[in-house]
Image: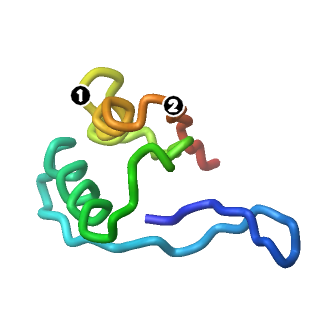
Amino acid sequence: MYVRIPDIYSNIIVDEYFCCVDLDVNTTAEQVFSKHNKFMTEKQIPWEKCCSQTTDRAAVMAGRFSGVGAHVKAVATNCIKTLYYSS
């Protein structure tokens, strides 16, 4: 997982490596969110700090009602969701 944060020295937005979690081959949205939630909890990072998320178009990530994005939105109510489209 990567995060986008402002670089206070260069005054630009940069992508930084955030974390990597092991996932099973067949993983549900609940399992993906659970692993991310565990990381956030262990590192004492409040979900309220999450203001945007970008995922690929995989159903487990982007599902409107039960995807990872829906789970994040439930705990980070101000978070907006965008989908990543590669060409």
Residue that numbered label 2 is attached to: 78
In the image as oriented, which residue stretches furthest toward the right?
Answer: 10
Kindly identify the residue that appears in the image at 50 percent across and 35 percent down: 79
Q: Is residue 23 left or right of residue 18?
A: left
Give the vertical position of 29 relative to 13 (above or below).
above
Q: Is residue 51 left or right of residue 36?
A: right
Q: Which mark is residue 66?
A: 1
Front position in the image: 17 or 61? 17
Front in this rendered view, residue 22 or 77: 77
CA neighbours of label 2 inside 10 A, class few (<14), some (14 to 19), many (20+)? some
Question: On the image, which quarter does residue 67 sit in?
Answer: top left
The spot of residue 66 in percent (x, y) is 23, 28
- Seen at 25% across and 54% down, the residue is 37
Residue at the image point whose x is 28% and y is 21% from the top: 65
Q: Amino acid at mark 1?
A: Ser
Left or right: 78, with 12 as reference point: left
